[in-house]
Amino acid sequence: MVVAKSWTMVRHFDGAPQPEDFLLIEKELPPLKEGEVLLESEFLSVDPYMRPYSKMKLKEGDVIMGSQVARVVESKNPAFPVGACYVAYAGWTTHFISDGTELDALPSNWPDNLPRSLALGAVGMPGLTAYFGFLKVCNPKEGDVVLVNAAAGAVGSVVGQIAKIKGCKVIGSAGSDDKVGFLKEIGFDEAFNYKTVSSLAEALKTASPEGYDCYFDNVGGKFTDTALQQMKDFGRIAVCGAISLYNDSVPSTGPYIQPYILFKQLRMEGFFDTRWQDQFPEGLKQLLQWVIEGKLKYREHITNGFENMPAGFIGLFKGENTGKAIIKM
């Protein structure tokens, strides 16, 4: 008998997520049928997208969405042997049964010394988001000046390093001095703490007086209102996230952006990484190769214990993580 523990949503979030919004339940799983496998989660992901998507995709009482690296502990499907590990999409749960669909194998050349949790980070969805969002939407050219906000996060830190690999000058914004130090460690040309600068506009101008060719936006809101004013003509903006707005109960208002887009002839485009799903194997192969070669560095913010998943998730919106936020079983 296997008992799965799962985190469910008590009610839709109103403002910032709170501990009382989550409920831990237990459920006995049935015996396996032919063709099925039982998996046990080893690492689970918490990501900002879960906040807006929960409103769109979940009902109250549902298991919270999310991915994990899970290990097969029992199998009645020869294609999925016991001990093999996969990236799965079963939500916030310790154990689950699968018929083999929505189980993605780690790349075959995964090094033994590389933590499998990286398949939820730089060599996983956040890495793919950075890879395709930056290369396909921003379309960088050697010598471009690139701005990245939330740059010490799972996506932003990868974007900045890819930009350096492509020969760009990279400026990053983060929310603490420690995070700014991390950005400089991984090769950002300039970095600043947006919480301590006296003027965001002045900080952006000082970092790149000539303006910005590319802007990879993870934050939205007032930051983007300011950044648009400093884009170069024909600049490209990839809208990946808007974490500054996710917890707003009342939609925020800001300056009208149309004049900047019009008179600077900017291209501003939102995207989901799944647009390039057919190219994921190519992207993962390249990301993994860069990690192996030391060109792509990573940091993980590990929270130990499944019981602490809500705390790990809530911490995202307080800026507690540097790099990818991971829950370790």
Image (spheres, rainbow, N blue to C red):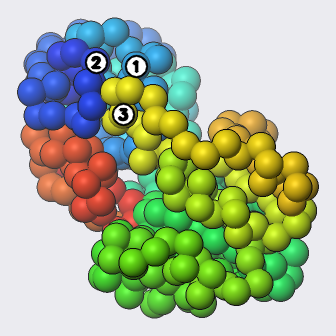
Give the spatial CA distance, label 2 vs label 3: 13 Å
Q: Residue at x 80, y 59 (%)?
A: 236
Q: SS of the residue at dot 1?
A: helix
Give the spatial CA distance, label 3 vs label 1: 13 Å
Residue 150 image position (x, y, % from top left): 47, 63
Give the residue type that dot 1 points to: Lys
Residue 74 image position (x, y, % from top left): 31, 30
Q: Residue at x 11, y 34 (%)?
A: 19
Q: Is residue 26 above or below residue 245?
A: above
Give the spatial CA distance, label 2 vs label 1: 6 Å
Q: SS of the residue at dot 2?
A: loop
Q: Earlier in the sequence, mark 2 or mark 3?
A: 2
Q: Which residue is mark 1?
A: 55
Q: Earlier in the sequence, mark 3 or mark 1?
A: 1
Give the residue type that dot 2 points to: His
Residue 299 image position (x, y, % from top left): 38, 72
Q: Which residue is mark 3?
A: 248
CB under 8 Å between callouts 2 and 1? yes
Give the residue type that dot 3 points to: Asp
